[in-house]
Structures are given as structure tokens and as C-alpha cells.
Image: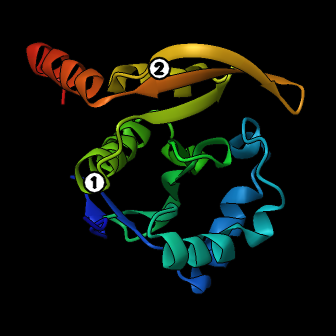
Amino acid sequence: MPLRLPLHTDRLEIRPFVLADQAAMQAIYDDPEVMRHITGGGDPRGWVATYVRDQRERGFTFWAVIERATGEMIGEAGIAPFDSGSRLELGYLLRRDRWGVGLATEAARAILDAAFDDLGAPEVMAVVDEGNGASLNVLHKLGFRDVGRRTREGVRQHVLRIRPADRRRARAGDEREGTR
């Protein structure tokens, strides 16, 4: 089944990038604090064009994250092949002024739903720098489990995985705590 876009959450719209989005994203990419934990991505000036191409060619990629209340582009989130293989990897980055209010969790949850429900992924991977505790917390909250460590570009990273059963357990925990 193809991925249905755009994705909508209470506060976000997640839609395919268009080339006109490049200027708004470049302002986000130019923030060194936002990019501090992004490794292996090459030059961000070409990322939006790559995302447009990847969406057309394979049907999934990283997408524009739009704040519904303001209509502003606040970042990107999506899935890509994990280490160029057949498994999927979740990733996201948001404007710094939108950190700490649950938007990364909200975007990632919607993308996981699409990966499992629409694409039928048996698992989704994620990689987080050891110094990025906030992102690690987001992934653990969603049900990701640590499966190892690696070093990329001289940076130690956590490698995490989530399977459908992990997602169900995390949601059940959210419902018990009244936090969803």
C-alpha cells in the first residue's frame, strides 16, 4: 500500500517537500545548534532537491514539517533506507524555537504509523549521537529499544529499533499514564 500524504497530527502537517521549500529549510540548516547532532548528511543545500527526487523515485523520504497553527515550516522528518539497506531509519530535525514542546515526538509518531501501517515495515531503526539526550528520550518514549552502538564520523552513536509490538507497548503505557 502506498504512503498517504500529507500526514496530519493535532499540531502538524507533514507533506512532501517542493523545491520552493529550500529557502525556509536553509535558514533551519544554517543554525549550528540544530545541526550539531546531524552526521553523514553531506551539504544541506542540496537536501531538499534530494528529498523531492527520493519521494518521486521510491515513495518515501524526509518531508516538510509544517506547524498547522502558523503555517510555518518548522523542520523535516521522515524515513530513509538505514545504512543504504532494506530496513528503514526514522529521522527528524526541528527549528530550535520549537524544541521541548513535544513536536518531535508528535511528528515521529505519525511517521512510525505510516511506516508500519502504510508501508508494512517490520521494524524501523534510528541513530542518535550519544550527546543528544533529548532525541534519545523522544525515541524511548515512542518505544524504541537500544540495539547497539557505532561510531560515525568520529561520533559515538546509539542504534535503536522499534517493531510493531514495541509501538503497541509504548502506546499502552501512554494510555495508562494519560499522555498521548
Mark 2 neighbour density, 10 Å: few (under 14) some (14–19) many (20 or more): few
Task: Left or right? Give the position of 39 relative to 149.
Answer: right
- Front-lying residue, 63 or 58: 58
Q: Residue type at mark 2?
A: Asn
Q: Position of residue 140 (x, y in %)?
A: 42, 19
- Taking the image as drawn, is residue 1 in sight? yes
Q: Residue at x 73, y 42 (%)?
A: 38
Taking the image as shown, residue 28 lies to the left or right of residue 71, namely right
- Quick check: 53 above or below 116? below
Task: Specify the label residue 154 is tagged with.
Answer: none
Q: Horizontally, is 124 left or right of 149 in the view?
A: left
The local secondary structure at tag 2 comes to: helix
In this rendered view, identify the residue nearer to me: 158 or 73. 158
| Circle 1 residue | 11
| Three-letter residue code for mark 1 | Arg
Q: How is the image coloured?
A: rainbow
Q: Which badge, 1 or 2, is on the more N-terminal residue?
A: 1
- Is residue 171 toward the left or the right of residue 5 in the image? left
Q: Looking at the image, which is closer to me, 86 or 2? A: 86
Badge 1 crowding class, 10 Å Cα cut-off, few under 14, some 14 to 19, many 20 or more, is some
Residue under circle 2? 137
Residue in the image at 77% along x and 62% along y: 44
Q: Position of residue 31 (x, y in %)?
A: 75, 51
Image coordinates of residue 17 in percent, x first then y, are 51, 75
As rendered, which of 106 and 126 lies closer to the eye?
126
Farthest residue toward the bottom?
20
**Where 142 sits versus 47, above or below?**
above
Q: For residue 67, which quarter of the picture?
A: bottom left
Q: Measure the alpha-carbon separation of dots 1 and 2.
A: 20 Å
- Residue drawn at the location 44% of the way across and 70% of the way down: 59
